[in-house]
Image (tube, rainbow, N blue to C red):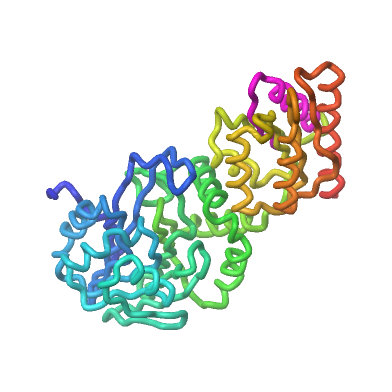
Amino acid sequence: MGDYLQAFKVTDKVYWVGAIDWDLRNFHGYATDLGTTYNAFLILDEKVTLIDTVKAPFFDEMVGRISSVISPDKIDYIISNHSEMDHSGSLPKAYSLMKPEKIFASPMGEKNLKAHFPDLPVDVVKTGDSLSLGDSTLHFIETKMLHWPDSMVSYLDTEKLLFSQDAFGMHLAGSGRWYTDYEEYTLRTEAQKYFANILLLYSSKILDLLKSLPGLNLDIKIVAPDHGPMWKGDGIGYILDLYRQFAEQKPSLKGVVIYDTMWHSTELMARSILDGMVAAGLEGERINLSASDRSMAVTKLMDAGVVVVGSPTLNNNMYPTVADFLVYMRGLRPQNKIGGAFGSFGWSGEAAKQITGILQECNFELPYPELKVKYIPTASDLEKCFNFGKDLAEKLKEKLQ
């Protein structure tokens, strides 16, 4: 493993001993262009404790970092805050090497870990339970569906440190461990992308968590997520405010046109629809699904008040990239959107109606019927597209008054 692998000192008692995945480009369906980190943390106390592990291929990297501080066989406890494989994949090897006295997980975490690793002994902790490590005590809070049923966070009292598992994180590989090591634009962009593609569906749960934090009487000086940089000082308020803003899903004066095109007719329609929205005073973006992945499209629409989706008809159906995007978006359930559907066709023209059906399933407000053009849009057709975008923008402005 080599002496070059070093732990990062977070506090006098806590070290980051995770792994950096510079090459990850897809995380269960969404593009991770900047890679990620798998954060694990070592607590030095009478009972030496490891908070989470790492994705299985990175086990040796984690062990190397632990070894720079303490012999791995000195670890007494392992806490599994989240049983997804990027955090628990190394658990069997860790148990075999470290031989801890106990592994702790939430009630659902215990079930999940047993399903993956039947021979692994796991003790259950619930909200309100605590675990003495000697000078320090860990306090456990279940955060179900953020973003798995097993999710929980752990609070280390002496260090005033919240191990927040997948909450308040982002997929961002880098040599810096603190948020201050990165530009604010990068932090906001990657936090928004992470929220849009992983947590958007659970926005109400996030708001509940944020509302409950004051009542928990936790003096939090550091937030340590399982992905991306840690937060301290002003950064804690920054990321909490971002999450509140994201979770509230308040529409802004922004419109996005998301589409794909076969022979550019749908693209011409998309251009005119966007021009209409911009002429009416909206900030606008046009997203071609052949040039941008589904995860970027979802990120861009998250704060948009108007979302318009277009597709040519291919074999009596939507274009494959549009169908892919809509199914992906439907699972994330964005809220408070005014929507519209459009498309070009040569023969049958079902695509626009199919788009409408999915937008209805997503509870989008659809003030106008879908807009369709046969073959190549004429000047008159493009004027209709322009007015379609303009009218949708006016509906949004009325709604936000």
Q: Position of residue 207 (x, y in %)?
A: 62, 65
Residue at 31% from the left image edge and 54% from the top image edge: 55
67 over 124 or under it: above or below: above
Tell me the chief SS of the magenta region. Answer: helix
Q: Is 266 a magenta residue?
A: yes
134 over 13 or under it: above or below: below
Residue at 61% from the left image edge and 47% from the top image edge: 329
Residue 90: image quadrant is bottom left
22 displayed left or right of 378 = left
User: In this picture, which residue range is highlighted in magenta?
Assistant: 256-278
Residue at 75% from the left image edge and 31% from the top image edge: 349
Query: Is 203 in front, or is 150?
Result: 150
Residue at 26% from the left image edge and 77% from the top image edge: 102
Query: Is 390 in front, or is 372?
Result: 372
Q: Position of residue 113 (x, y in %)?
A: 35, 69
Residue 353: image quadrant is top right
Q: Position of residue 243 (x, y in %)?
A: 57, 57
Residue 231: image quadrant is bottom left
244 over 307 or under it: above or below: below
